[in-house]
Amino acid sequence: MEKACGLHCTKINNIGVKIGKDVILKDVNIHIHCGELTVIIGRNGAGKSTLLKAILGEIEHTGDIVFVDQKDNVTKKIKIGYVPQSINIERHMPTTVYDLFASCITLIPVFLRKDKKIYDEVKEHLKIFGADALIDKSIGDLSGGELQRVLIAIATKPTPNLLILDEPVSGIDRNGIKEFYKIISKLKSEYDMSIILVSHDLELAKKYADKVILLDKEVIKEGTPDDVFKSLEFKNRFGELS
């Protein structure tokens, strides 16, 4: 994966979503600097999933998302990597990690033949995430942590301007969570990547986030984990966090 350089800010500008007369999101403005993990928190119904859908272009919305490089050049054509909360997998499906990965990066039907060049390319990229040994393993046989590493590898090829992670550690054990955040630290430091993570786990947000966004249809509070978790706005919604 080539290091992304020159991009220094992802700007989510005035995102709004209405369904009928109901306001789901209102004037959401978030600036995400490269090399930072921004965690979005909020109660159920706060609009977190809707915001992700708006960023991904899956629902109609007002506002836009742009990237500004170090020379203040703005581009609206962005590359977004996305790791969903879960994917439906049959436990005994024969599809391998290579099959899934290759189908995402090439138009060649993977069931016809195994392309050595693509195989080597996939294996090399998986190696970044400590997942190269999984290349021939059936998707259905992966543990939660293994699957997460594979999905992040797929989401970062080609290197995105913005990586979005939706509840990425749900169902993963403690060791898997630790490995996941090692990967995130590597993406931040080595690839200078802008990362948005939506999470219900406030303790993990407090421990790993560079910046926390408290969402309740609009941005209610943002800042460092301490800024947000000690704020009156947070306490009014979640109470005290130990």
Image (cartoon, grey):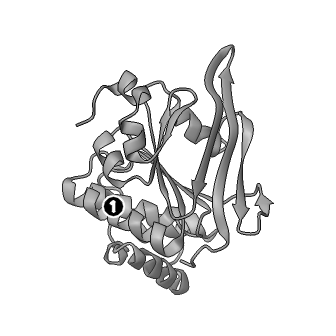
Q: Quadrant of residue 107?
A: bottom right
**Residue farthest to the top, as pictured:** 21
Camera-nearest residue between 37 and 44: 37
Q: Quadrant of the C terminus?
A: top left
47 to the left or right of 58 = left
Determine whether, in the image, residue 54 is placed left or right of residue 128: right
Q: Quadrant of residue 20?
A: top right
Res. 214 visible in picture = yes
- Vertically, is 103 above or below 21? below
Name above or below for residue 23 compared with residue 114: above
Q: Can you give x and y, in whole percent of width and height, for residue 50 in the image? A: 56, 33
Q: Are there few (<14), some (14-19), or many (20+) residues within 10 Å of tag 1? A: many
Q: Is 89 rendered above or below residue 183?
A: above
Residue 124 horizontal side relative to residue 140, left or right:
right
Q: Residue at x 54, y 86 (%)?
A: 117
Tell me the residue at 60%/73% (across/down). 4
Query: Of residues 87 and 94, which is closer to you in this image?
Result: 87
13 to 124, vertically: above or below: above
Q: Nearer the viewer, residue 22 or 222?
A: 222
Percent from the top left, x then y, of residue 127?
Answer: 39, 79
Instruction: From the image, tell me which residue sits under label 1.
Output: 180
What amino acid does circle 1 point to?
Phe
Asked which secondary structure carries label 1, the reply is helix
Residue at left 62%, top 62%? 161
How far from the left and from the top, in percent, is residue 190? 48, 75
Whether residue 96 is visible, yes or no, is no
Quarter-of-image position of residue 181: bottom left
Q: How many marks?
A: 1
Q: Residue shown at 35%/26% (left/top)?
A: 235
- Report x, y in % for residue 168: 38, 50
